[in-house]
Amino acid sequence: MSGNIDEDEANVTHTGPKGVINDWRRFKLESMNQESLPPQKRELLRQMSSPHKPRDDGRGGLNPKMSVQEYEMIKEDDEKCMKKYRKQCMQEMHERMSLGPKFEGVHELDSGEAFLEVIEKEHRLTVVVVHIYKDGIKGCEQLNNCLDCLAAEYTSVKFCRIDAEATGAGERFTDDVLPTMLVYKAGELLGNFLATNQHFNEEFFSTDVEAFLNVYGLLPEKDLVARADGEEAAGDAETVE
């Protein structure tokens, strides 16, 4: 059992400044073809990659303080390896943020059954925004246009729309409560916004709807996702160079 514990501890990704440094050192050690390195450089990298202080066992152990020559020996490998490590970290962060399916555009629901299915069977991490509308009702067309724009920016959110009559509960969604916007996650109703256009000016845009939903914390952090995508693209460009 103790052997398993040691192995688990070795695979732990630490947090905080010291943890990041140790993770980087371990990554560097593991990513290099050590068999092709001179013995002195191989031992130096091994020592640097250990989170523990080197032990002076009286058998010629390396001094924990590197000499200028030793520093120059490993300096040339740092930049390329750091780029690779940075790219891996960004990919891992992107994967954590990208859990769940991706969607394109606004999905048209044609029945009450389709409405219930998207609420009950969608991935538990997916936010579902449903616009209940009726042609000719003030604000419905504008909200549809806004959701078209947001669907292109928030691909992890499932945006849907359904005609009030198609819901099978037209008596509940009368003209005076339209457009209605409902927000669900894991089958739970998180937001119920009747006559949604009343929250905006006469003319409103996707940025207004975005800000409104963000007030209630109903949209993912787009800036963080965009930054992860940008860093990943930059890492790819650096690799090509």
Image (cartoon, rainbow, N blue to C red):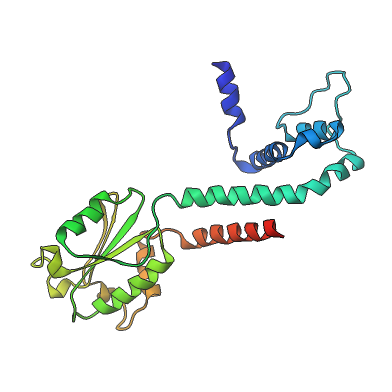
Q: Tell me where residue 82 appears, x and y as whole percent.
A: 71, 49
Instruction: Say which quadrant the N terminus sits in.
Output: top right
Q: Residue sitting at 37 percent across and 67 percent down?
A: 151
Quarter occupied by residue 132: bottom left
Eyeballing the image, is 105 above or below 58? below
Q: Residue at x 90, y 39 (%)?
A: 67
Q: Is residue 211 visible?
A: no
Which residue is at a point 20% across and 58% down the rendered structure image? Answer: 114
Residue 146, by quadrant, is bottom left
Left or right, 82 with reference to 105:
right
Side of 86 relative to 195 (left or right)? right
Where does residue 17 sit, x and y in percent of width and height? 66, 43
| Above/below status of 219 relative to 80 | below
Residue 217 picture location, percent across and down: 37, 59
In this rendered view, identify the residue nearer to me: 30 or 119. 30
Displayed quadrant of residue 137: bottom left
Q: Is residue 228 left or right of residue 216?
A: right
Residue 55 x, y percent position in the rendering: 79, 23
Q: In this view, does 49 lie above or below 207?
A: above
Q: Residue furthest left?
A: 171
Instruction: Kindly give the residue lying farthest to the top in the view shown.
Output: 1
Visible in this render: residue 195?
A: yes
Closer to the camera in the image, 22 or 35:
35
Which residue occupies 72% across, 60% down? 241
How many marks the image carries: the answer is 0
Residue 26 placement, left or right of 61: left
Q: In this view, does 18 lie above or below 189?
A: above
Q: Which residue lies furthest to the front in this view?
A: 36
Frontmost residue, 207 versus 102? 102
